[in-house]
Image (cartoon, rainbow, N blue to C red):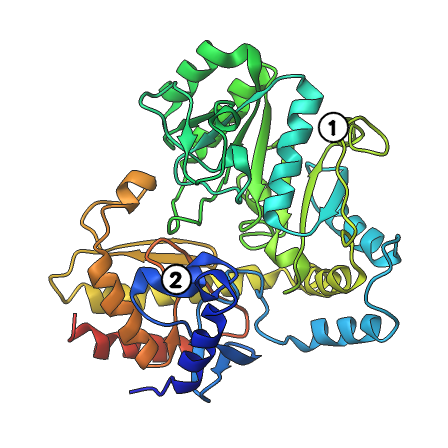
């Protein structure tokens, strides 16, 4: 048994002063019935916890560490900038350099505004859509997560074209009445909603590669359909690429699929491990953002020099060696094959979804394509799987409804170790 005395003690202390002992709910390990691991070090593909245990990390801070932990290129850049000051609340050259790198290498955007989180990016993009169009309602999809914004914390209503209801206490129903929630991959539901509310729909928001309920693979034809119906009805198409941006390709899912959104949200990787988010569009749309236009949005730490420097080092590395995306896809395919080879020898039902460097395992007989089918997964089996892999030194996201994220520092030997760990764990499942 791996010793976790220090992590357990740290968690008990945290619960006295932090809600649930954490600053983000999934970290509490409640969905897997355990106490969280407290990490103290990270290097490449590995992390070390407060008890000195080392793990192969297939979570990577939920996606941003695409090059691995403590990448020397990122650390060098951040250290150089940090020695001159950490924040000024004023413009700095790194935000312009990072913006230029992103805009010059993304075919569908011309201007970008940096914020401090993916939630803030989605919130700001939605406000911008409403400000540009003069409309109030938005469409979102079950299984897609856009942060804890009031109007986006919504579950589906009772019918395909009805308004949503709140999924969190503290949100007035009047807020969510401006949100229409529809099933993924269902053009008829979108058509019905647009027919009923089209005169007041500002945007259709979607994760083009949903990765917050496991990896939910979208039909490209559905995304193309969304592009068409938005164009025909003067509705803005908003791609939330906080996770997929710079992970499946440098230009994200929109570049990967060759589909032009009207607005894009970024996060994760563009901060190189620091808190950051961004929203972007063509100049015609972005010129509506203050101080140029009437849509107000501000942030004292937006464009913080440390986050911008980290993101600049991260994206420069990816841009200079785009082969990294092929390497990551190859490693992820290798992991997929290995997991499949082990699980296929059992009578345990399972599904594996994979795209680029993201992969998820669902213990169900039903192909997982949306929120509803993801919910059929056997969570009891996942809990045993998660804790079994943890005992073998493999750190997975502590939820059955999250994607794994591979990084470039991960070796094929590390993947073999992961597959061998599953061989040992599977006997107990």
Q: Earlier in the sequence, mark 2 or mark 1?
A: 1
Disc 1 is placed on an element classified as: helix
Foreground residue among 318 and 378: 378
List x then y, in percent, for residue 233: 56, 13
Mark in the foreground, 2 or 1? 1
Asked if 283 appears above or below 53 in the picture, the reply is above
Left/right of residue 381 with respect to residue 101 in the rendered view: left
The image quarter in which residue 58 lies:
bottom left
Is 415 situated left or right of 202 in this image? left
Give the vertical position of 408 relative to 101 (above or below): below
User: What residue sits 67% from the left and 17% below the top?
Assistant: 134
Identify the residue position indicated by label 2 in the image.
333
- Residue 255 visible in this rendered orientation of the protein: yes
Residue neighbourhood size for the residue with mark 1, other residues' Cα within 10 Å, grouped as few (<14), some (14–19), many (≥20)? many
Number of residues whose C-alpha sits closer than 10 Å to that of mark 2, classed few (under 14), some (14–19) or many (20 or more): some
Rendered location of residue 89, percent (x, y)? 85, 55
SS label for mark 2: helix
| Nearer to me, 39 or 244 | 39
Q: Position of residue 260 (x, y in %)?
A: 61, 32
Q: Quadrant of the N terminus?
A: bottom left
Name the quarter where the C terminus is drawn: bottom left
Question: In the displayed structure, would residue 398 be above or below residue 176?
Answer: below
Determine the residue located farthest toward the left in the rendered image.
Answer: 347
The numbered disc on residue 285 is 1
Q: Tell me where residue 301 sits by quadrant.
A: bottom right
């Amino acid at each position: 048994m791996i010793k976790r005395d220090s992590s357990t003690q740290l968690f008990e202390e945290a619960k006295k002063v932090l809600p649930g002992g954490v600053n983000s709910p999934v970290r509490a390990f409640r969905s897997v019935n355990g106490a969280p691991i407290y990490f103290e070090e990270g290097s490449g593909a590995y992390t070390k916890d407060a008890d000195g245990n080392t793990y192969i990390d297939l979570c990577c801070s939920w996606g941003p560490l695409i090059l691995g932990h403590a990448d020397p290129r990122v650390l060098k850049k951040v250290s150089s900038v940090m020695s001159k000051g950490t924040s000024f609340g004023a413009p700095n050259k790194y935000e312009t350099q990072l913006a230029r790198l992103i805009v010059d290498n993304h075919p569908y955007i011309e201007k970008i505004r940096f914020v401090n989180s993916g939630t803030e990016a989605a919130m700001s993009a939605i406000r911008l859509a409403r400000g540009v169009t003069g409309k109030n309602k938005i469409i979102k999809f079950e299984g897609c997560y856009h942060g804890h914004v009031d109007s986006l914390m919504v579950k589906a209503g009772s019918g395909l074209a009805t308004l949503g209801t709140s999924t969190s206490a503290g949100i007035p129903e009047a807020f969510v009445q401006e949100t229409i929630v529809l099933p993924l991959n269902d053009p008829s539901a979108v058509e019905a909603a647009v027919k009923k509310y089209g005169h007041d729909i500002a945007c259709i928001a979607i994760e083009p590669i949903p990765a917050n309920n496991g990896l939910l693979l979208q039909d490209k034809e559905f995304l193309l359909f969304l592009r068409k119906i938005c164009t025909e009805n003067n509705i803005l198409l908003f791609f939330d690429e906080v996770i997929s941006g710079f992970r499946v390709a440098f230009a994200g899912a929109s570049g990967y699929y060759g589909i032009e959104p009207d607005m894009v949200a970024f996060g994760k990787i563009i901060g190189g491990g620091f808190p950051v988010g961004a929203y972007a569009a063509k100049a015609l749309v972005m010129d509506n953002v203050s101080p140029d236009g009437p849509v107000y949005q501000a942030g004292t730490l937006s464009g913080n020099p440390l986050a911008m420097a980290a993101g600049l080092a991260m994206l420069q590395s990816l841009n200079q060696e785009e082969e990294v995306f092929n390497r990551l896809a190859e490693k992820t395919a290798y992991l997929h094959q290995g997991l499949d080879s082990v699980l296929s020898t059992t009578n345990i039902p399972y599904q594996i979804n994979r795209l680029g460097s993201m992969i998820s395992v669902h213990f169900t007989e039903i192909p997982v394509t949306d929120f509803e089918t993801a919910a059929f997964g056997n969570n009891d089996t996942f809990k045993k799987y998660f804790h079994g892999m943890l005992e073998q030194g493999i750190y997975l996201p502590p939820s059955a409804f999250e994607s794994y994220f591979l990084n470039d520092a991960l070796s094929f030997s590390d993947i073999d170790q992961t597959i061998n760990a599953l061989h040992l764990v599977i006997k107990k499942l």
